[in-house]
């Protein structure tokens, strides 16, 4: 399967554009060995210009980073509710694991910045997520640090978070954060997603992308679930791109690290599912930068201020 960008697909159909680039299944992806000649259509093989996504016509996909995190405490259910109310379907999060093996949604590996853990557990410095049980973390206030009006917000478990994404009919760019701290987190995350119904054909094709700064982690996810769309967070050199294309569909870089030529190089390769690779860049919170990266041809913009980006470049 390949994640179809639904609004774009509908608009492209309206425009009469060919959508064959969006079809495809994992079965059509034939990973080639690194350095070996790549057959046409295989990962790492050149992608024709016609295979590049339709963002050039329709504007980039806008992802609410850690939810609408400029307006509500990051990685809480309140932050994805806020994104929904603002009209954004795609949200991004970060997944880590507690001492007793529960997956939770939080960005830092310490609880200190985004909760009141220092007051509740003053003797537990440096307050690492992996050193606390899920029950302990559930006691923490994850909203007051951001704004007193969010007092009582919690660090959600991934299960709680996914239930809210589902209720909100949103889509998720799920980041496996610091996987080196959490052996087996990829398999555990996929198991939970499967239990919650997020690995059926519809979710996989339209509503879920898994990403990580760890190439190893992305590779593991691709091996375990070859049908899932994945993204690597970083900016590999153009020469390195074909290796990444073997296990991922997208390269998601920090916006300061890219040029139009680099984006073009990514688009010029077929990814793990045989389609042109895509680029979703982060963190873009101002109109000028949003316009700049759109000019570079990125497919998506990951932002704390999705309204600002939408206002600047359209997108959806
Ligand atoms: O989705 C991209 C972005 O989340 C990567 O950076 O540190 O916010 O997880 P970070
Ligand atoms: Ca993230």
Image: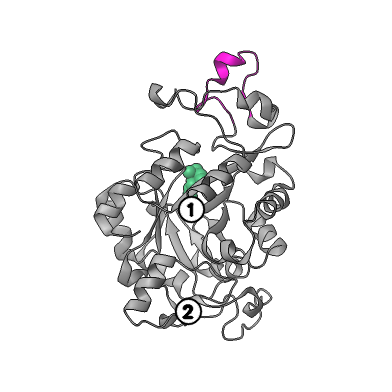
Q: Quadrant of the C terminus?
A: bottom left
Q: Residue furthest bottom?
A: 40
Tell me what residue is drawn at x 64 percent, y 13 percent: 123
- Give how far across and how far down residue 203 sits, in percent: 57, 61
SS at mark 2 in the image: helix
- Above or below 111: residue 85: below
Which one is in front, 148 or 38? Answer: 148
- Give how far across and how far down residue 287 sits, in percent: 25, 50
Q: Is residue 219 magenta?
A: no
Tell me what residue is drawn at x 60 percent, y 80 percent: 42
Tell me what residue is drawn at x 68 percent, y 53 percent: 190
Q: Quadrant of the N terminus?
A: bottom right
Tell me what residue is drawn at x 57 percent, y 83 percent: 41
- Give how far across and how far down residue 232 sits, in percent: 55, 58
Q: Looking at mark 2, is its residue's CB closer than 8 Å to ligand 1?
A: no
In which image quadrant can residue 155 be found? Answer: top right
Q: Which mark is residue 169?
A: 1
Label 1: how many residues lie within 10 Å, few (<14), some (14-19) or many (20+)? Answer: few
Which one is in front, 316 or 30? Answer: 316
- Above or below 158: residue 279: below
Q: Looking at mark 1, is its residue's CB closer than 8 Å to ligand 1?
A: no
Q: Main secondary structure of the magenta part?
A: loop
Which one is in front, 105 or 107? Answer: 105
Q: Which mark is residue 203?
A: none
Q: Which residue is mark 2?
A: 21
* C-alpha span from label 1 to label 2: 25 Å
SS at mark 1 in the image: loop
Picture mark count: 2
Segment tinted magenta in the rendering: 110-128
For residue 305, side relative to residue 224 (left or right): left
């Amino acid at each position: 399967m390949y994640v179809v960008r639904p609004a774009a697909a509908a608009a492209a159909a309206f425009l009469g554009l060919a959508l064959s680039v969006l079809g495809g299944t994992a079965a059509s992806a034939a990973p080639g060995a690194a350095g070996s000649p790549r057959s046409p259509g295989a990962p790492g093989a050149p992608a024709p210009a016609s295979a590049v996504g339709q963002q050039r016509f329709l504007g980039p996909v806008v992802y609410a980073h850690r939810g609408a995190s400029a307006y509500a405490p990051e990685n809480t259910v309140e932050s994805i509710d806020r994104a929904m109310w603002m009209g954004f379907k795609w949200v991004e999060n970060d997944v880590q694991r507690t001492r007793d093996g529960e997956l939770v949604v939080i960005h830092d590996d310490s609880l200190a910045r985004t909760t009141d853990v220092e007051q509740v557990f003053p003797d537990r410095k440096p307050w690492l997520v992996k050193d606390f049980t899920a029950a302990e973390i559930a006691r923490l206030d994850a909203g007051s640090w951001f704004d007193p009006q969010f007092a009582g917000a919690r660090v959600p478990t991934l299960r709680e978070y996914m239930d809210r994404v589902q209720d909100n009919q949103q889509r998720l760019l799920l980041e496996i954060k610091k996987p080196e701290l959490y052996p087996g987190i990829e398999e555990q995350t996929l198991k939970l997603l499967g239990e919650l119904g997020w690995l059926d054909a519809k979710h996989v094709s339209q509503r879920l992308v898994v990403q990580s700064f760890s190439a190893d982690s992305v590779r593991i996810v691709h091996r375990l679930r070859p049908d899932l769309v994945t993204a690597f967070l970083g900016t590999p050199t153009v020469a390195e791109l074909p290796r990444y294309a073997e296990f991922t569909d997208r390269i998601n870089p920090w916006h300061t690290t890219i040029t139009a030529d680099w984006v073009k190089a990514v688009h010029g390769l077929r990814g793990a599912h045989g389609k042109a690779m895509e680029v979703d860049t982060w963190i873009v919170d101002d109109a000028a930068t949003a316009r700049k990266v759109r000019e570079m041809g990125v497919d998506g913009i990951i932002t704390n201020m999705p309204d600002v980006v939408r206002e600047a470049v359209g997108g959806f």
